[in-house]
Image (cartoon, rainbow, N blue to C red):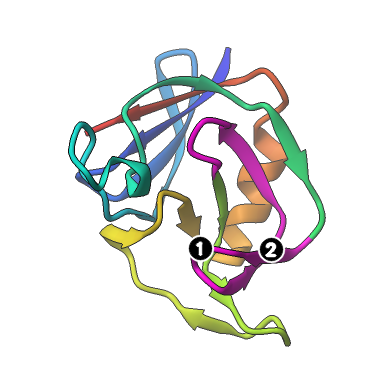
Amino acid sequence: QRWAKVDVTDATISLMNGSDVYKTFRAATGRGIPGTETDWYSTGPGVYSVASKSNVSGNSFLECVYSLYGIDFDKDRENRITSFALDSNSAVTDSRIGPGITTGHVRVNPNDLQEIMDYLQTGDIVYVQW
């Protein structure tokens, strides 16, 4: 079974096949702390599933940045796996890696995002741990 493991502390997302790691990518994750007043901005721990995949780029109201297509997994917080922040010409404007950077999204290099998009399918599990 294919699934993804997001480790907020290690700032990684691993594509899994059963218990085997297929590939691991560095990522940026949310700046909020679950269970506190900043909870909305966290990449909240839990078990989610890929709700949808979008091939449409756009901007995030909260982050005021563009991003490439993405994978929606936490509908309550509107969190998704998406690309680094981009400007309107698709040039990377923020390529920082680590915890405490985004408003909850899991952001990766645009090239890595394409591989993650190809690997995960709607309904696959996304497990977020701290």
Whether residue 78 is in magenta: the answer is yes
Question: On the rendered structure, is 37 left or right of 53?
Answer: left
x, y (%) of residue 68? 69, 63
Task: Determine which residue is flagged by label 2.
Answer: 68
Sequence-wise, which precedes: disc 2 or disc 1?
Answer: 1
Distance CA(mark 2)–CA(mark 1): 16 Å
**Up-down: is 61 above or below 6?**
below
**Up-down: is 100 above or below 19?**
below
Which quadrant is the C terminus positioned in?
top left
The residue under the point 40% across, 15% down is 19
Question: On the rendered structure, is 1 left or right of 46?
Answer: right
**Up-down: is 112 above or below 74?**
below
**Other-residue count near label 1 (Cα within 10 Å), few / some / many at <14 / 14–19 / ≥20:** few
Residues tagged 2 and 1 counted as in contact (Cβ below 8 A) = no
Q: Which residues are magenta?
A: 57-79
Task: Determine which residue is flagged by label 1.
Answer: 62
Question: On the rendered structure, is 14 left or right of 68?
Answer: left
Which quadrant is the N terminus positioned in?
top right
**Amino acid residing under circle 2:** Leu
x, y (%) of residue 31? 27, 55
In depth, the one of 36 and 1 nearer the eye is 36
The residue under the point 68% across, 43% down is 117
The residue under the point 68% across, 54% down is 114
The residue under the point 63% across, 84% down is 87
**Amino acid residing under circle 1:** Leu
